[in-house]
Image (tube, rainbow, N blue to C red):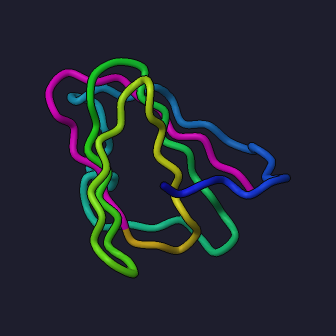
Amino acid sequence: MKVMPVGAKAYKKTPEFTEGTVPKGLLADHQTKQGVWGNIVVLEGVLEYTILEPEREVIQLSPEHCGVVEPAVLHYITPRGAVRFYVEFYR
């Protein structure tokens, strides 16, 4: 499991998304900038988080299990039914 570095500071948060409002860019391969971490917070339902580098890893996110996004690592998400979530960004 990926862990946010100690001392990382939140600086931005997306609006809440659902399976119907998630931006298409999050459903395709994408990455954060160098030095930018993400925290995917699921409020309801299940979201599949696929990390593509250095090895493919698929993680099921839920209200009990957030997903940490490492800087500049390719990844994408896939809603698994009804879901509500947002993403926080850290430096």
In the rendered view, would you say 35 is above or below 68? Answer: below
Q: Is residue 41 left or right of residue 51?
A: right
Q: Residue at x 31, y 72 (%)?
A: 52
Q: Position of residue 70 (x, y in %)?
A: 55, 64
5 or 91, which lies in front? Answer: 5
Q: Position of residue 18 (x, y in %)?
A: 30, 26
The reply to whether the magenta stretch includes residue 80 is yes
Q: Position of residue 25 (x, y in %)?
A: 32, 55
Q: Residue at x 26, y 50 (%)?
A: 24
Q: Is residue 78 left or right of residue 54?
A: left
Q: Position of residue 76 (x, y in %)?
A: 31, 58
Q: Is residue 41 left or right of residue 76?
A: right
The outermost residue toward the right is 7
Q: Residue at x 42, y 28 (%)?
A: 42
In the rendered view, would you say 8 is above or below 29? Answer: above
The prevailing secondary structure element of the residues shown in magenta is: strand
Q: Residue at x 61, y 37 (%)?
A: 13
The reply to whether the magenta stretch includes residue 77 is yes
In the rendered view, would you say 37 is above or below 40? Answer: below
The outermost residue toward the front is 1
For residue 64, what is the image quadrant?
A: top left
Q: Which residues are magenta?
A: 75-91
In the rendered view, would you say 7 is above or below 60? Answer: below
Q: Which quadrant does the C terminus fall into? A: bottom right
Q: Is residue 66 left or right of residue 77?
A: right
